Amino acid sequence: MGKAVLDFVLDLLYPRRCPVCEGILGRNQGRICVSCKEHLPYIHEPLCKKCGKQLAKEEQEYCADCEKTDHLFTCGRAIFLYEKDLRRSVQRMKFQNHREYLDFYAEEMARAGEKYLLAWKPKAILPVPMNRRKRRERGFDQSVLLARKLRDLTGIPLDEKSLIRIRYTMPQKELTAKERKSNLKDAFLLDPDCKIQEPVLLVDDIYTTGSTMDAISRELREHGIREIYFLVLCAGRS
Ligand SMILES: [Zn+2]
Ligand SMILES: [Zn+2]
């Protein structure tokens, strides 16, 4: 069977679907359908100067969380609001093994995040490490896959070995802010022999309170790394 015929048959058997609405994509469509493309929930100004969350009022400089927290990272940005269809999409990616969505996610992070990357000039991408038990359950690690694709799209070197998660931690979403902090204490370890250069760019799918980014930043700072940025796919509103 010729390749064109094979592709045609595969399309009939396993049609490509829009990662946002799950609608079937025509052969000549891009990674998402036309109507989802028009309504993607990009985070827009005003943004929290620190964590990049979308703010309700122009007069604010920081979100409520960054107002009261001395975050240990330099700053970070997210591409999409973690709401509605996009939230459901991320949940399908994680819990129903739709890792094919990650191509779309990474392309959006590279394209819409380009202005940040040009300003920050990171010398290394570090994926936020997932604990091993979780990775076994899920079968893949979305932050590593996102980071690899981002490396391919931007040319920024990737280091997926030096930063590891050493403790099994409770799922953060079940904890209060205070519990989140102690839950993550000493959860991350940076290889003392690694040759990571700053600025570094942490990559993950979701940003919530920043306790994970702070726990990693604490470990990086102990090794003299102080310029710490993050780029994530999505974040909630302030
Ligand atoms: Zn769609
Ligand atoms: Zn903030």
Image: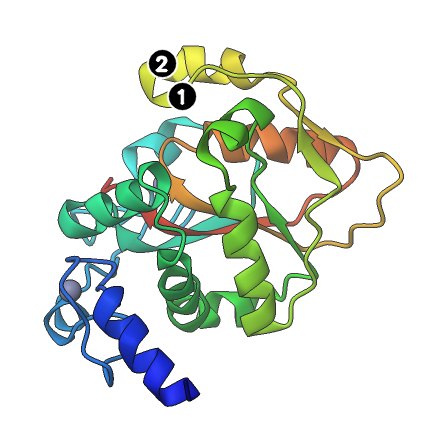
Report if residue 133 is visible in the image.
Answer: yes
From this view, report whether residue 128 is shown above or below residue 118. above
- Which residue is pictured at 22% across the width and 45% down the height? 87
Whether pointer 1 and pointer 2 mark residues with C-beta atoms closer than 8 Å, the reply is: yes
At 24% across and 82% down in the image, what residue appears?
27
Q: Which residue matches tag 1?
A: 172
Left or right of 215 in this view: 6: left
Give residue 231's position: percent from left, percent from top. 47, 53
Residue nearer the viewer, 29 or 67: 29
Q: Crowding at label 2, few (<14), some or many (≥20) Cα neighbours within 10 Å? A: few
| Quadrant placement of the N terminus | bottom left
Question: Could you say which is closer to the camera, residue 86 or residue 140?
Answer: 140
Q: How many marks?
A: 2
Quarter of the image with the C terminus in it? top left
How has the structure been colored for display? rainbow
Image coordinates of residue 88 in percent, x first then y, are 20, 44
- Report ligand 1 position as a quadrant: bottom left
109 to 70, vertically: above or below? below
Task: Determine the secondary structure under disc 1.
Answer: helix
Q: Is residue 25 above or below residue 97?
A: below
Query: Residue 154 vs residue 237: left or right?
Result: right
Where on the picture, by quarter, is residue 130? Answer: top right
User: In this orientation, which residue lies closer to the viewer: 137 or 237?
Assistant: 137
Q: What is the C-alpha distance between the residues marked 1 and 2?
A: 5 Å
Residue 16: assigned label: none
Residue at mark 2? 175
Q: Percent from the top left, x then y, of residue 97?
A: 37, 44
Q: Is residue 42 left or right of residue 165?
A: left
Q: Residue drawn 68% across and 32% down?
A: 164
Residue 157, image x, y percentages: 70, 63
